Amino acid sequence: MLLVASILVVGQMYIVMPLYGAMASDFAVTTSAAAWTSTAFGIAYAIGFLFAGPMSDRYGPRRMMVSGLLATAVLTGLVAMAQGLVSATVLRSLQGAAAATFAPAAFSYVAMRVRPGHRVFVLSCVTSSMLASAVLMQLAAQQVVSALGWEAAFAACAPALGIVALGTHFLLRPTPGSGGTSLLSALARMPRLYCQRRLLVLYLATMTLLGSFVGVFTAIAIGGVSNDPHSLLVLRVAGLPAMLAVPFLVAFLQRFSAIDRAAAGFLVAAGAAVMASLFDGQLSHQALALFLLAGALAVSAPALVERIGQAAPAERGAATALYAFSMFLGGSLGGQAVSAFAAGGIAPALMWIGAALLLGFVLVNLSRRL
């Protein structure tokens, strides 16, 4: 249930990307104007994390996941009924706020209810599903929009989210909340987590992780292969097998500490990005490099969650909420930053992505000394 929910919920960030053209035509606006439906979701999604973490601590992760999934299901269905750009943008922002309740609660649930021996495997599965949703939901939306229109993509997701909410309620175990701590008090303590030097550098490393991941898709889209549908498809899906395979390597990965796994993942991903830039124009070689990059990031992401949870065990929900906030903030900034370099081709953009990942490697190692 956690994996399916991860794909459906986090995938709502990406599902709209193939729909811009159809929405622009239907609403009689430009494609860039239609992209505001993505921006509105992203802003609300990032802000929502700041509230979702303390609420997960207060009310319990399972209750937060169930209520958040139900709210997301209703709002997703309403997006499909939007009659104009303004209403679609407002509904997407509300959808983003509701969807933000899932990730912090899911990470807290795993920490509370999964035995330590299985925890790395489950975290790897959840984070890999969240990363894989970028590919899966875009591909699914592209197929739906060509046959049934943009509304069908949201209309199909709404009942699916409702079913997952019911499954989450009946299949996941109850999780207690702290109860007594008010939401405002919990929010007031969150800046203190950012002021802890060890957590701060880990959050900064988290920003480089998703920023680089989103940056790769940005570079692929506008870096010189977008006019070749076959090449675009190959590069987009190149990392998917690696993301799905990483959880099955947990028996090996658990031999190493979370901090070692995170550092190694950043270093391999940085090398893969540089390798991909050197193979500009060689599709098979670039696809292999992006396969390695995606797999390495799928190793680092759960390791960072685990390390952050270890650093703030008493405020795990708030700490993981800031992790999720940092990830999405990095993703938003990464796409914009890479677009400035991608105009000159995919190679220079990938070089800058490699530099960002190397910075993440340095930050992770710096956290050892703090």
Image (cartoon, grey):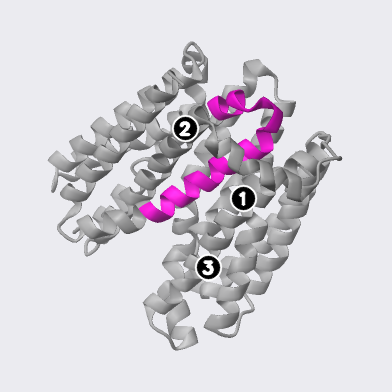
> Does residue 312 appear in this view?
yes
Q: Residue at x 36, y 33 (%)?
A: 360
Q: Can you give x and y, in whole percent of width and height, for residue 100 in the image?
A: 63, 53
What number of labels is visible? 3
Q: Is residue 134 left or right of residue 314?
A: left
| Amino acid at circle 1 | Phe
| Amino acid at circle 2 | Leu
Q: Quadrant of residue 169?
A: top right
* First in sequence: mark 3 vs mark 1: 3
Q: Quadrant of residue 48?
A: bottom right
Q: Which residues are magenta?
A: 306-333
Q: Can you give x and y, in whole percent of width and height, for residue 245 in the image?
A: 45, 30
Give the residue number, with chain letter if any, for mark 3.
Answer: 40
In the foreground, 40 or 314: 314
* First in sequence: mark 1 vs mark 2: 1
Q: Residue at x 64, y 15 (%)?
A: 117
Q: Residue furthest top?
A: 255
Q: Are marks 3 and 1 in contact (CB under 8 Å)?
A: no
Q: Which mark is residue 49?
A: 1
Residue 353, relative to residue 360: is it above or below? Answer: below
Q: Is residue 89 magenta?
A: no
Q: Residue at x 62, y 72 (%)?
A: 91
Q: Residue furthest bottom?
A: 28
**How many residues crowd mark 2 within 10 Å: few (<14), some (14–19), many (20+)?**
many
Q: Residue furthest right?
A: 180
**How many residues crowd mark 3 within 10 Å: few (<14), some (14–19), many (20+)?**
many
